[in-house]
Amino acid sequence: MSEQKPIEDASAEASATRTPIAATVAGLRAAFDAGRTKPLAWRRTQLARLDALLAENGPALEAALWADLRKSGAEAQYSEIGFTRAELGSVAAHLRGWLRPMRVPVPAALLPASAKVVLEPLGVVAIIAPWNYPVQLTLAPAIGALAAGNAVVIKPSELAPATARLLGELVPRYLDPEAVAVVEGGVPETTELLAQRFDHIFYTGNGTVGRIVLEAAAKHLTPVTLELGGKSPTYIDDTVDLDAAAARIAWGRFVNAGQTCIAPDYVLATAEVQAKLGPALARQVERYFGADPAASPDYGRVVDDRHFARLSGLLGAGEVVTGGQTDAAERYLAPTVLADVPRDAPVMQQEIFGPILPMVTVTGLDDAIRYINAHDKPLALYVFTEDARTKKRFTTETSSGALGFGIPLGHIGVHALPFGGVGASGMGAYHGRRSVELFSHAKAVLSKPLSPDTIQLIAPPYTPARENLIRKVLGRIS
């Protein structure tokens, strides 16, 4: 590859030659209609080129993520670049088998015949990405869309401008520019994009914008996948090693400065467990980020001033166990743990999406399950217990996009597991095979020879003998 231009210069050059959105989408549709994206060879080439984009531009991607979120290089690798490459590898390795038509049995009444399910690409897909993991959550959905044989338009988040500019430069250089496009910009560009007709829209973000996406999609009867969020609970009891549990909870809460849709949003525990868990969490925060997290190269920052002001306004409830310090100029909010937070506190009324972890007192398991079920179904639910009965009750008595025992966030790294929400936390799921199926139409194909013509056994005129056959024999055959 040629020497990479600075992100700012590339952005200025791109903006000067930007194609109107309607024309961009029309060009993608023309490429799809011409059959450009359907061959397996094209799909595999796009996956290989996307992997090359990630492999050859690691330093530039890390620099962009640092500029947008103060994300460390190591965190950028395992949570963004490496994660996406692992997803790519899994899909590429299995794609041929996943696309193979699946034969299904035919009822005896229709024999002789054969039936199969064929996956066919949907057409032109729009991927509208968030800012918190602007590489992973932009490109991971694109993997499935490309593998399924679609033309794709990608809309990175304007709230992660350095990453958006870099992707706007790199994607056309690596992927097929006739079938894959990037639309940069903010709300006006997203609004114009949503006015176009697509065959599928994939949106990751919050519920407010999710409703706008659904409303726009309804005008064209476009199917939509919504990856939203919500308040993901964590329940912990006294049967576990609290120090070990605290290490995992603190990591899951404060990675990316808490700006993770599946991060533990709050902890439910008895007063006795909280009294021990709070100091354990404080010790783990210091272990990860030092006595002064503001000086740690491994601790990120809040994405912008608006979110910083919102998060700062959520402080003040309960008792501060650790953290609470803020620096508006740096958009720094210390990793903060709050104990004995009232259930009606402002921090418990919205998804936090930042480095604040409130602990809410419950009387026990029944109270915790009641509390969770009284609220919107979360994107994830985490349980720390060694009690088999408690695990079974959470499995059978609660509903969430995912359920993790003993580990937060971990399920997203298992590519064979579906990733998605339920209810207010989203609709539809992806990763691995499900990504390919999500961006495909499962077409039913039935083939029956003209001879022998067994259909005549159920066709009129219904003579007494034929009616008797239908009632006594064919009506019972499946």
Image (cartoon, rainbow, N blue to C red):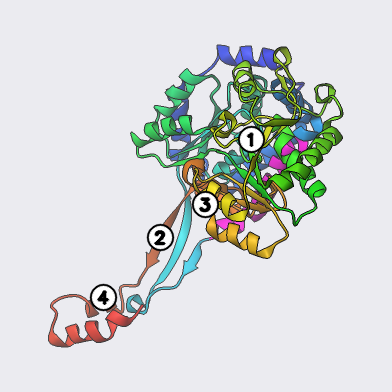
Which of the two labelled residues, at mark 3 and mark 2, occupies the earlier sequence position? 3
At x 68%, y 35%, the residue is 357
Disc 2: which residue: 444
Query: What SS does tag 1 mark?
Result: loop
Amino acid residing under circle 4: Ile
Where is mark 1, residue-wise? 341
> In front: 79, or 302?
302
x and y percent of residue 14 in the render? 60, 16
In the rendering, at what x and y percent does residue 378 appear? 55, 44
Q: How many labels sit on residues?
A: 4
Crowd band around label 2 with a 10 angstrom C-alpha radius: few (<14), some (14–19), many (20+): few
Q: Which residue is mark 4?
A: 455
- Answer with left or right where residue 29 lies relative to residue 65: left
User: Over which residues does the magenta segment extend?
Assistant: 77-100
In the image, which disc is placed on residue 437? 3
Residue shown at 63% from the left, 53% from the top: 364
Tell me the kind of residue under disc 3: Glu
Q: Is residue 250 above or below residue 192?
A: below
Is disc 4 surrounded by few (<14), some (14 to 19) or many (20+) residues within 10 Å?
A: few
- Contact check, label 3 and label 2, Cβ < 8 Å: no
Would you say the residues marked 4 and 1 are in contact, meaning their CB atoms lie under 8 Å apart? no
